[in-house]
Structures are given as C-alpha cells and as structure tokens.
Image (cartoon, rainbow, N blue to C red):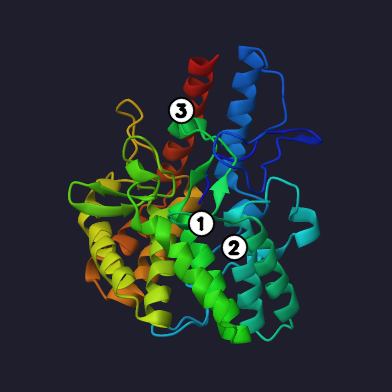
Amino acid sequence: MLETGIVRRDSLAIIMPGLAPAGESETAAVPEPPLPVKAVIEAKRAVLSMVGGGIDFSPQPLGRHVDPKGIAGYYCDLSGKTRLTEARMRNSEYDWIIPIAQYALGLWERRLDGEPTDAEFLKAVDWLLERSAEEEIGLVWRTGLPVAKYDLAAGWISAMGQGQAISTLLRAHQLTGEDHYLKLARQSFGPLNVPVAAGGAQRELDGALVLEEYPTKKPCAVLNGWIFALWGVHELTVATDDIEARVLFERSAAGVVELLPRYDLGWWSRYSLYDHSGRPDLAKPFYQDLHPTMLEGLGMITHDPALGGYARRWRSQRTRIGTARAAVDKVIFRLSRAGRSA
C-alpha cells in the first residue's frame, strides 16, 4: 500500500493526476519550505502516520466472505475505504488506481454484507477503467505521483494496483456476466508478467519472483503490496484457469515464504527490503498490524505453515516498547531524508 502519502498544506493539496503517461504527469507547484520548517513538517507527518487516521489507515482485517476457490469476498475487508464518496475522491489525491480499486472492493464487501451497493460498485469500475490505458504489455494504470523515498519518478506501474484492478474486474464480471470484464482482467495481468527492466512490475530477487508495488531501480519488495498483487493473480487463475497466471502465482507465493526471514528484525517487521544506505525500511505500526493479516490471507490459499508462524510472531512483537522504538526510528528517518533533500 502506498506509504509515502500526499503532501498537504492546510487547504492546499498536491493532487495526484488520475492517469498521466510517463514523463507527462503534472503536480501543483508548491514552494519548498526552509529546512527547519521542512523538518517540522516531516516530523508531524511521521507522527500522524504512526497513530493512523483517515481512510488511508482504516482497519483492514481479514475479509468475512472469503472463498479461496471462488470469487467471493476480498481477502482484506476494505469497507473502511468507502467512507469517502466517489464524488469527493475524484480529482483529489485519491484519484488513482489503488484508492479507486480499494474503494470498489470495499463496496463489494458491503454488498456481501447485504447493502445495496451494486450500482455504486459498477460506477467505481467505470471510473477505474477511465484511468487505464492499453499498452503493448497489457492494460496499464500509470501513477503520476513521484515517490522520493524510493527514488521513483512519475509514470510508474504498481503490481499492487494491477492485482487489485484484476480482483475488481473479476467481481464486475461475476456481478454482470459481461465477458469484457473478464477480458480486461486478463489484460491487466500483462504487466505482472513483464520484468521491471522491460517496463513491467516483476523482478527476481535471489531466485524469488517479486511483484513490485514500486518498480524501483534496485529491489524494493514491499511486502503488503506484493501479497495484494498475488491475490489478484490467484483470483485470475480461479476465474480463468490461466496457466501463465498459475505458474507465476505458485512461484511468487513460494518466494514470499523464502524471503520472510529477511523481513523479520527480531523485534519488528520490515515494510520492504529496500536498502536505504543500510537502514532498514521499518513497517509503521499500521503495517505491523496489517502484515499478519496479509500472511493469513495468503495462507488461506497456499496452506504454508510458515505464513501462520510469522503472522503470530509479528503480532506478538506489537508491544508498547516495539511500537515506540519503530515510531522514533520513523521520525528520525523522515528528518534525515528532509535534510538530505534540502
């Protein structure tokens, strides 16, 4: 999940364009503040991200209607992502693939709870498709937000976004019976089957096949984004029995298990495996809570006992001391990054 956030200055916001080709995205021009002011902004932003708040950090427990052998409820309950309406999300920092897909999947969860959300869900699917583009590698959503934390320029493709788009389109197909949604879901898989170096969203990391939420120059492997992408690939295999998708899922899911020890710091988990000059990319407390849910959801599919073992381990690490230690580290990291970019 996008961890970096959107910079807000009181009533002003840097608006994320819904879809912008690589190299052509536009962001509002905001004057760079002096270093002391920038340090205060970064510290405040870090603290707010620790305590959570808003739809970005709404609770995401295991879904209540999951069927690993079918297209039912989503693996995370994203109903909290529907607290903002589509009208409020459009032309805002939420007008891009991941927030739109999560909004739609949240509406789907509410539908399975008995709420009449069919029309809203299909409207959200239309909105999602408005932000897509057909390219040689498949149906693509490009993100107009540069990510300084990972030295990533605007125009990137997110494996997490592609996977959640697949999950959304498969549910639109199930609801309507219209085959074009199934075709679009297949096309959305394309970038997940192409290496980052060739413009896609997968890479090899010591033999493990990683689906990159952020297609950075050096390995990143954001854990939650990788697993969100895997859920979409798995659901595509369930709906279509696609051989390429099945092979990719099995190999990449095995890669998660292979690399899990690298995410474990003994007292906390890593958000990613990105190398910040030797400094570990620690998970925020929100992600320390989310990681066990992600592992349990993947375990519902693969039944690998290692996933449940790490889920229990990371839950047990969510102590007051561990949380405080992670929070201090995040504040220091943001301040040091603000200083380097000044």
**Residue type beneath disc 2:** Ala
| Badge 2: residue crowd in 10 Å (few <14, some 14–19, many ≥20) | many
Calculate the distance from the C-alpha at mark 2 to the C-alpha at mark 1: 7 Å
Read off the residue under disc 3: 333
Question: Left or right: where does residue 213 sit relative to residue 175?
Answer: left
Calculate the distance from the C-alpha at mark 3 to the C-alpha at mark 1: 26 Å
**Residue type beneath disc 3:** Phe
Residue 341, numbered circle: none
Q: Residue at x 68, y 86 (%)?
A: 114
| Closer to the camera in the image, 124 or 141 | 141
Whole-percent x and y of residue 32? 67, 18
Q: The residue tagged with tag 1: helix, strand or loop?
A: helix
Q: Residue at x 70, y 35 (%)?
A: 14
**Residue type beneath disc 1:** Gly
Q: Are marks 2 and 1 in contact (CB under 8 Å)?
A: yes
Which sits earlier in the primary sequence, circle 2 or circle 1? 2
| Badge 3: residue crowd in 10 Å (few <14, some 14–19, many ≥20) | many
Read off the residue under disc 2: 101
Q: The residue tagged with tag 2: helix, strand or loop?
A: helix
Q: Residue at x 34, y 53 (%)?
A: 194
Residue 279, relative to residue 133: is it above or below?
Answer: above
- The C terminus lies in quadrant: top right
Q: Nearer the viewer, mark 3 or mark 2?
A: 2
Read off the residue under disc 1: 161
Residue lying at the far left of the rendered structure? 207
Q: Residue at x 35, y 35 (%)?
A: 217
| Closer to the camera in the image, 141 or 209 | 141
Residue 183, relative to residue 176: is it above or below?
Answer: above
Whole-percent x and y of residue 50? 55, 43
Residue 171, relative to residue 82: is it above or below?
Answer: below
Calculate the distance from the C-alpha at mark 3 to the C-alpha at mark 2: 30 Å
